[in-house]
Image: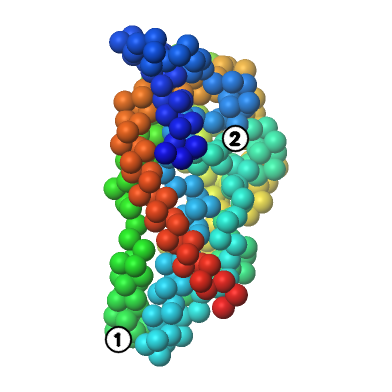
């Protein structure tokens, strides 16, 4: 068993003490499952270490793209994939578990937006490839090349979906926690001066609309509209009005106690999920890591080409 697995099992054992009264003293060793201040500040949660990070997915997707590109070249068709950073740092707007993070610093810098995954030139090249007009024969070849690449690097979808489902369930259920709902009521009162007509019931969590609301997204042109010639740019810099509302939102989440209650509810629910499913999570994570290792091998073999 790897050091990482041992650490995660130790965490699951500690969590057992808080979740199940039936856990014996020998199973818990008196460990404290509560998050520390650093974990709370970075919104670290028990299931963060499972599944695939955005950075890892970028690398794996690029490996698949390179295989498909080679297949197209062998078929006599040009399908050049731009070079990218296959191990980019995590976005400042995302937690380790890939949840949206909104602090006053982030709100001041980005408003409700996120920085793009790829540089602008790379995005343009990928967009051109995606919109390229292909003949029936060329499309058939591309489909086959993609299928062959996916066969070589089969995505462990079921394994990734399991950990993602546990995380999403905790996120949704946390929004229905009584303390979270009470704090959300205080947040709504705090946000009234902003004059948002469709202010959601929750700023985050649950299974309905959260912040930014639909009216804000439309006002700040955050969504691309397929039926409009003048498309929105979700990567454009946030304007002064958007920043002001986002900063007010952050401050209201803090002063109302929403962030504290929502984080505590998610920690508790993810702790339960980890204690109940650690064996399956560990088994499936090994398959995910094997897939990532295979993807890294493809990238390493083609480095510099």
Residue farthest to the bottom, as pictured: 76
Residue 260: give its label: none
Where's the C terminus, which quadrant? bottom right
Disc 1 or 2, which lies upstream in sequence?
2
Q: Nearer the viewer, residue 245 or 54?
A: 54
Residue 274 image point, x, y percent: 38, 28
Task: Identify the residue at horizontal 51%, vertical 71% (top origin).
Answer: 301
In the displayed structure, 302 sits above or below 245; it is below
Coloring applied to the structure: rainbow
Residue 183 in sight in this render: no
Task: Identify the residue at horizontal 49%, vertical 15% (top origin).
Answer: 31
The residue singled out by tag 2 in the image is 102
Left or right: 250 as drawn, with respect to 17: right
Residue 190 image point, x, y percent: 59, 20
Task: Identify the residue at horizontal 63%, vertical 54% (top origin).
Answer: 236
Among the 4 quarters of the image, the one containing residue 118: bottom right
Among the 4 quarters of the image, the one containing residue 230: bottom right
Residue 115 image point, x, y percent: 61, 51
Q: Nearer the viewer, residue 30 or 226?
A: 30
The residue singled out by tag 1 in the image is 137
Image marks 1 and 2: residues in contact by CB distance under 8 Å: no
In the displayed structure, 63 sits above or below 20; it is below
């Amino acid at each position: 068993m790897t050091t990482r697995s041992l650490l995660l099992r130790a965490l699951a054992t500690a969590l057992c003490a808080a979740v199940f009264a039936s856990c014996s003293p020998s199973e818990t060793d008196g460990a404290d499952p509560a998050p520390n201040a650093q974990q709370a500040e970075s919104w670290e949660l028990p299931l963060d270490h499972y599944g695939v990070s955005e950075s890892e997915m970028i690398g794996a997707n690029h490996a698949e793209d390179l295989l498909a590109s080679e297949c197209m070249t062998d078929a006599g068709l040009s399908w050049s994939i731009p070079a990218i950073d296959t191990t980019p740092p995590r976005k400042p707007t995302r937690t380790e578990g890939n949840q949206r993070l909104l602090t006053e610093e982030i709100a001041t810098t980005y408003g409700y937006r996120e920085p793009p995954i790829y540089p602008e030139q790379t995005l343009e090249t990928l967009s051109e490839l995606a919109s390229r007009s292909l003949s029936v024969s060329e499309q058939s070849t591309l489909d086959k090349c993609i299928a062959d690449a996916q066969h070589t690097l089969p995505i462990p979808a079921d394994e990734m979906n399991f950990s993602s489902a546990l995380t999403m369930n905790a996120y949704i259920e946390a929004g229905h926690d009584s303390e979270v709902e009470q704090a959300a009521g205080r947040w709504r009162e705090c946000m009234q001066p902003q004059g948002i007509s469709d202010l959601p019931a929750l700023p985050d969590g649950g299974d309905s609309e959260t912040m930014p609301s639909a009216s804000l997204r439309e006002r700040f042109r955050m969504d691309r509209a397929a039926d409009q010639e003048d498309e929105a740019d979700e990567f454009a810099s946030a304007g002064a009005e958007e920043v002001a509302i986002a900063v007010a939102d952050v401050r209201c989440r803090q002063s109302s106690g929403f962030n504290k209650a929502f984080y505590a509810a998610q920690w508790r629910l993810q702790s339960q999920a980890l204690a109940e499913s650690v064996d399956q999570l560990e088994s499936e994570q090994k398959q995910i890591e094997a897939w990532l290792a295979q993807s890294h091998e493809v990238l390493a073999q083609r480095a510099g080409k």
